Amino acid sequence: MDGDALLRAAQEMLGAAMSDGAWMPALENLMKRMGVLGGGVARTTPPRMFAIPSSGVRQQFLDFQSGRTPPLTRRSHIRTDPAAGFITEGMAFGPEGRRRDPFYNEFLVPRHCVHQASAFLDRTDEGDLNLITYRSAREGDYESDELTAFGTMLPYLRAAVMASRSLMRAGARRVAEPFERRGEPVIHLGHDARVLDLNPAARDVLGLEIQVVAGRLVAPFAPDQSRLDAALRITLQDGRPTMTTLMGSERASTVRLLLMPVVGAALDLFDLTAAVAILIDSSRPPPVDEEALSLMIQAGGLAPREAAVVRVIASGGTPRDAAARLNLTFDTARVYLKTAYQKLGVHGQVDLALLARRVSAS
C-alpha cells in the first residue's frame, strides 16, 4: 500500500469539501487507494441508515434504502469510538459474532461485502457519522498494518466532513437570511419534514393556521393539511419552491406558507436543514426595523413598559399578546399602548410602521 498516495487522497477530499462540497470523485479515489470494494460516509441509527456511497457499493445502499434487505439491527452495525481508529467486524463482534446475523449473512455476504472496517468521523444529534469500507472474500480481510495506515488519514477525513457540514449550514442560512432580516416567521425543516428549528417570530404566530405537533408541521383544518403535505413533497423530494395558502376552518386566511429548498447532496446524512418554511401573513403590517424602532422609542421618551408593549405591537403582535408576554393585564397593556402612541404622535399599528420606515429611510 502506498501510504503517501493514501494521504494525498484524504487531502484531496478535504480540499474538495472546503471548496465546493463536491467530494464524490475524491471519495472514489480514496476507496481505490484503500484497496477496498467500496464504501462511504454513513450515519447509522438502526433500523435506518443514510449514506453517500462510492460506486463499488452504491447498489447495495440503494437496495437497503428501498427495503429489500433483512432489518438492520444494532448487532449488524459496528459501533465506532472517536478515540479509536478503524475497527473491523472481528474486533467489534469477535470471530463468529456476526456470522449469525441475517443482515450480514443474507444481504452483505451475497453482495460481496464480506469484510468491513469502520472509523468515527463526526457526531450529530441523530447519530455518529462513520467512514464504512467493505472488502470481498477475494480481496481478503484487513491487515493490522493497513488499519494503522488508514488511521493516519482520519484527521483529514474528519476535517472534510466538518467542512462539508459547515457549507450546507451556510446554504441554509443564505436561504433564510433575507426573510429573517425582514422579521418573517421562519421554520427550518429536515429532509423528512421534521421541524429542526424556528425563530422567535415563528413561535409567536404558531397556533391558529399551523402548529408544531410531535416535531411536525400540522394544520388543524384537514384541507390545509392536504395542501401542506403536497407542498412538502414537492419541495423536499423534487427540490422546488412551493407556496400554499392556509385557509383555516371558518374564514379565508391571509396566511401563506412559502417553502424554499436548500441545495445539498448530504442533508439527510448530516440531518441538516433541507427546506426553509416562511409564514407570510398579509394582514399584518410589515415588520418594523429594530434600529428605527429604538430611535423612535428614544425620541418619544417612552417609559420601559411603554417601550416593551410597543415592541410587541411593532413585531406584529396584539395588545393581548403584549399582555401575555409581559405579564400584564389586558387593560394595563392597552393603557401603556395608548400613552406610547400619544408620545409618538401616531394613531395605531399601521401609523407606527409607517413612521418607523420613514425614520429608517432617513
Image (spheres, grey):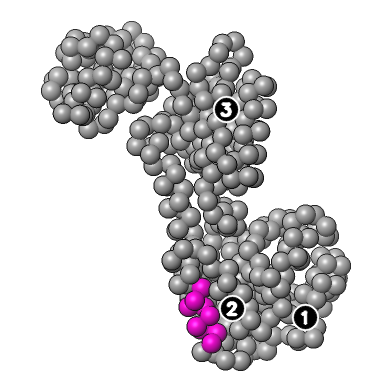
Residue 141 image position (x, y, % from top left): 74, 85
Q: Earlier in the sequence, mark 2 or mark 1?
A: 2
Looking at the rendering, which quadrant does residue 128 occupy? bottom right
Quadrant of the frame with the N terminus: bottom right
Query: Which quarter of the picture shows residue 116?
Result: bottom right
Q: In the image, which residues are magenta?
A: 5-13
Residue placed under numbered mark 3 in the picture = 244
Q: CA distance from mark 2 to mark 3?
A: 44 Å
Instruction: Pick the residue in front: 323 or 176.
Output: 176
Amino acid under disc 3: Thr
- Nearest to viewer (mark 3 / mark 1): 3
Q: Amino acid at mark 2?
A: Leu
The reply to whether residue 194 is visible in this rendering is: no
Label 2 sits on residue:
30
Question: Which secondary structure lies at badge 1?
Answer: loop
- Mark number displayed over residue 302: none
What residue would you read off at disc 1? Answer: 136
